Image: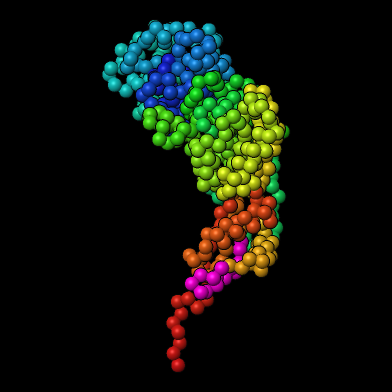
């Protein structure tokens, strides 16, 4: 197993910049505002030939345990306990502060190997602050500039010396990276009648999205059975999109917590814009997206816009009506919510909706069963033979309309993509095909081949003309 490195320090010393440098990607939000990072973020990292798990943490702040800052500090202390090595980061430009000294004592009491990192040391002004760092008694400070990539060879040597060469190079295995974008997956041979079965053992990526204070972090904590994510009564606690590993019935799951998404007109601050952009990125990298709605005030305009975005991105959506313990008449409320789901979201007919209570930990099995069933449908393939037998039947019952006095001809259909299901229809004059008939074909596909609850892509294309480009012969 690779060793784990926790990056800690007071706010605004550059912890997230160091984290991004080590993982090789801009995963953590970075801004000049102190206290941007609130949750622990864990990711595979590499420093030249060293491979390890890096943990980005919230800045240490002296606050009461009941406050938001106090809960953030508790998450950071857990990261220190879970780590094999601690990078204690100070700001070389600003110099040492009483907060640095106080939290250096906490790190020292953890009895974990520590590397003292003096970040922002690229200028001469950082030399005095680097020398001051000797005062905390954590050894020689390593001057680096995470923003410019300076001092990293010295950091590598310090990590090896602190953790030991044997532990540092214990594993040579490559990390499994599940953070790859998922576009529609092409079908190699659309005419093949052999359909591979759905593999329910493959890892699954799930993003949890919704408006602020819907209970997204609380839901993920309840699913995995630990207080992994920062929660509280305040709206908008989550800023970064945090991924968490989980096993459900033997299947590996990667859960993405996201920042609450408000209406675009209300998002004014730069930091919130970065948080929303990070959430959109998580949606694009997910396979299934759980839209968490507050059961007491469901289907606000923003909820519908979020769902529409997910459908346009081609992800597999599932609705979870959270805070079900606050609903007075569950049976009547559920019937009403399902009627609204069908009426307000016709573009993804059959969308699965499950009532849950994250606080009471109820409805989780039904939710995950809906997720896996939606994922199966999202991956579903239909053979070309079955599709064309169906097409012949629907045309007999409801033939294409005539446009400008000429009847449109639909000749052939095949599936070319999965994730989500994508089909191509060969027809005459595709530009003239009315959208009403396209919707008729999509609804027919959905009901005939059990494709409910996922987006369906249907493209109209002109058939190949064997005489195209050939000059007419003259006698």
Foreground pick, 369 / 342: 342
Foreground pick, 200 / 220: 220
Say which quarter of the image contains residue 255. Answer: top right
Q: Would you say residue 403 sits in the magenta stretch?
A: yes
Report the quarter where the N terminus lies.
Answer: top right
Residue 17: where, in percent of width, then height?
41, 26
Foreground pick, 368 / 321: 321
Residue 233: where, in percent of width, then height?
53, 20
Residue 105: where, in percent of width, then height?
48, 7
Say which quarter of the image contains residue 2. Answer: top right
Residue 282: where, in percent of width, then height?
51, 36
Residue 311 visible somewhere in the drawing: yes
Q: How is the image coloured?
A: rainbow
Foreground pick, 387 / 383: 387
Give the farthest residue toward the left: 124
**71 w.r.t. 195: above or below:** above
Residue drawn at x 65%, y 27% is: 327
Residue drawn at x 53%, y 40% is: 304
Residue drawn at x 60%, y 31% is: 295
- Majority secondary structure of magenta residues: strand
Residue drawn at x 38%, y 31% is: 268
Give the farthest residue toward the bottom: 475
Q: Would you say residue 238 sits in the magenta stretch?
A: no
Query: What are the residue bounds of the magenta stretch?
Result: 401-414
Report the quarter where the C terminus lies.
Answer: bottom left
**375 w.r.t. 401: above or below:** above
Residue 108 visible somewhere in the drawing: no
**348 w.r.t. 136: above or below:** below
């Amino acid at each position: 197993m690779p060793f784990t490195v926790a990056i800690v320090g007071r706010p605004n010393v550059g912890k997230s910049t160091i984290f991004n440098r080590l993982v090789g990607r801009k995963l953590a939000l970075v801004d000049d505002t102190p206290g941007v990072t609130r949750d622990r973020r864990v990711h595979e990292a590499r420093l030249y030939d060293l491979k390890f798990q890096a943990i980005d943490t919230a800045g240490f702040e002296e606050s009461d345990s009941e406050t938001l800052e106090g809960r953030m500090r508790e998450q950071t202390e857990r990261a220190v306990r879970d780590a094999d090595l601690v990078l204690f980061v100070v700001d070389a430009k600003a110099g040492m502060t009483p907060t640095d000294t106080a939290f250096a004592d906490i790190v020292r009491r953890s009895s974990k190997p520590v590397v003292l990192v003096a970040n922002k040391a690229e200028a001469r002004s950082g030399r005095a602050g680097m020398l001051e760092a000797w005062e905390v008694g954590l050894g020689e400070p390593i001057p680096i500039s995470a923003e410019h990539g300076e001092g990293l060879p010295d950091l590598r040597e310090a990590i090896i010396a602190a953790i030991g060469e044997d532990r540092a190079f214990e594993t040579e295995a490559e990390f499994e990276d599940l953070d790859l974008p998922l576009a529609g997956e092409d079908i190699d041979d659309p005419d093949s009648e052999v359909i591979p079965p759905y593999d329910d053992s493959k890892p699954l990526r799930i993003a949890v999205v919704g408006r602020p204070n819907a209970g997204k972090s609380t839901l993920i904590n309840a699913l995995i059975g630990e207080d992994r994510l920062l929660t509280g009564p305040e709206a908008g606690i989550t800023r970064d999109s945090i991924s968490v590993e989980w096993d459900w019935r033997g299947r590996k799951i990667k859960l993405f917590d996201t920042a609450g998404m408000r209406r675009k007109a209300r998002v004014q601050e730069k930091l919130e814009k970065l948080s929303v952009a990070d959430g959109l990125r998580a949606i694009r990298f997910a396979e299934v997206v759980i839209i968490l709605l507050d059961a007491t005030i469901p289907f606000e305009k923003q909820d519908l816009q979020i769902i529409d975005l997910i459908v346009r991105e081609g992800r597999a959506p599932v609705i979870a009506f959270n805070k079900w313990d606050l609903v007075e008449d569950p049976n009547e409320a559920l019937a009403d919510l399902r009627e609204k789901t069908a009426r307000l979201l016709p573009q993804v007919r059959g969308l699965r909706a499950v009532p849950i209570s994250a606080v009471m930990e109820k409805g989780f099995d039904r939710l995950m069963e809906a997720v896996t069933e939606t994922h199966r449908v999202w991956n579903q393939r239909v053979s070309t033979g079955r599709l064309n037998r169906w097409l012949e039947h629907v045309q007999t019952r409801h033939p294409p309309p005539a446009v400008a006095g000429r009847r449109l001809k639909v000749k052939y259909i095949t599936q070319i993509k999965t994730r989500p299901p994508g089909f191509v229809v060969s027809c005459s004059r595709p530009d003239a095909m009315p959208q009403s008939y396209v919707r008729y074909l999509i609804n027919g596909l959905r009901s005939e081949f059990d494709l409910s609850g996922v987006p369906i892509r249907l493209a109209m294309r002109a058939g190949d003309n064997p005489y195209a480009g050939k000059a007419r012969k003259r006698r």
